[in-house]
Amino acid sequence: MKTILVTGGNGQLATCIKDLEQSINGFEFIYVDSSELDISKEDQVNCFFSENTIDWCINCAAYTAVDKAENDKDKAFEVNVLGTKYLARACEEHGAKIIHISTDFVFGGDACFGYCETNATNPIGVYGATKLQGEQELEKLLERHFIFRTSWLYSEHGHNFMKTMLRLSESKTELNIVADQIGTPTYAKDLAAVLLEVVSSNSEAYGLYHFSNEGVTSWYDFAHAIFDISEREIEVFPIKSEDYPTPAKRPHFSVLDKTKVKSTFNIKIPHWRDSLKEAIKQID
Ligand SMILES: NC(=O)c1ccc[n+]([C@@H]2O[C@H](COP(=O)([O-])OP(=O)(O)OC[C@H]3O[C@@H](n4cnc5c(N)ncnc54)[C@H](OP(=O)(O)O)[C@@H]3O)[C@@H](O)[C@H]2O)c1
């Protein structure tokens, strides 16, 4: 029996992994939240790895509050950079492999094609910058690593755009949604399934991968689809990013090219609209 440590164990992605853990055999899972294992505390990480035999670590822990990070740089750095570094060191020392999750926000958003793993990064906010530095620490310290950059993560768990839209539709009759940020939603369960496939196949195809659902959309069209599929009566109006100012700037374009992940792991990725139907079914 091999042991998989899932950090950030109460978060959205970790909960999706929990939902699917029965789909693979021969593994036991340990989920830890920040009160059980704070990845930004080196002594806690070292102690945890000394007391438990870990074969794989799936690092779902992160400082994910994109806007808050702008005024909370030190905390974002502690979790996204130092936390990743401490996990990488511990995995190296104890012979474990790591799967780390990163983000489309490592890109600046001035492309007009899907970003490949080899494209230059240029984060425009603190969150993206700290996530990128976390990737770099990991790459330096541990060869046996997988980094999955993903985008617009949502599911029936945790806080995300889909759930916010469904909640707002209960009290509003119309909404203004940004239409000039283009990307691809990712159903966290689709990502979780791929991560479990990597673990169960004991893959050694280490490196950096891009993963989202298939297709391209805007937040405006995504909101529209959420209301269409869930049959909610609400009017949605497209607005520009500048008419919805936020502390952190977001990339205008962050579509990820998934050629590498599809060919390496021989997977088919669902279109975002099909996965959205699945997610809404879980909520209805
Ligand atoms: N959500 C998105 O749209 C999106 C898009 C692209 C990439 N990603 C990446 O995908 C991954 C998973 O995201 P998610 O949506 O599942 O995020 P999430 O729901 O916010 O979960 C993150 C978890 O990290 C935990 N955490 C924070 N600081 C910690 C620390 N110091 N030590 C241990 N745990 C800590 C949080 O637990 P506490 O609440 O207990 O602190 C939380 O449960 C992250 O790496 C994120 O950067 C997310």
Image: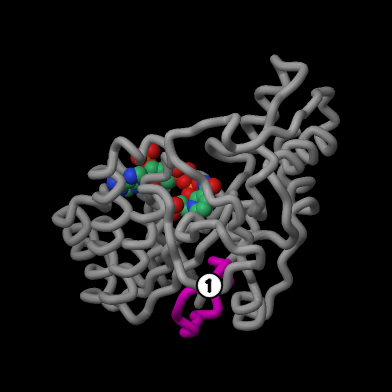
Whether 83 is among the magenta residues is no
In this view, 138 is above or below 105? below
Q: Is residue 143 left or right of residue 190?
A: left
- Image quarter where the N terminus lies is bottom left
Q: Is residue 121 left or right of residue 63?
A: right
Q: Residue at x 80, y 23 (%)?
A: 234
Which residues, given as a range, are shown in magenta? 194-210
Q: Residue at x 28, y 76 (%)?
A: 140
Amino acid, disc 1: Tyr
Number of disc labels = 1
As drawn, which residue projects farthest toward the left? Answer: 43
Q: Position of residue 136 (x, y in %)?
A: 33, 69
Q: Nearer the viewer, residue 236 or 234?
A: 236
Q: Position of residue 93 (x, y in %)?
A: 21, 75
In this view, 204 is above or below 224? below
Q: Residue at x 73, y 57 (%)?
A: 216
In this view, 282 is above or below 275? above
* Residue 266 seen in render: yes
Crowding at label 1, few (<14), some or many (≥20) Cα neighbours within 10 Å? Answer: many
* Residue 33 seen in render: no
Q: Secondary structure at mark 1?
A: strand
Quarter of image, res 279: top right
Q: Is residue 92 left or right of residue 258?
A: left
Q: Position of residue 60 (x, y in %)?
A: 43, 54
- Image quarter where the C terminus lies is top right
Q: How is the image coloured?
A: one colour
Q: Nearer the viewer, residue 183 or 111?
A: 111
Quarter of image, res 255: bottom right
Whether 204 is among the magenta residues is yes
Q: Residue at x 79, y 37 (%)?
A: 224
- Residue corresponding to mark 1: 209
In this view, 112 is above or below 250? below
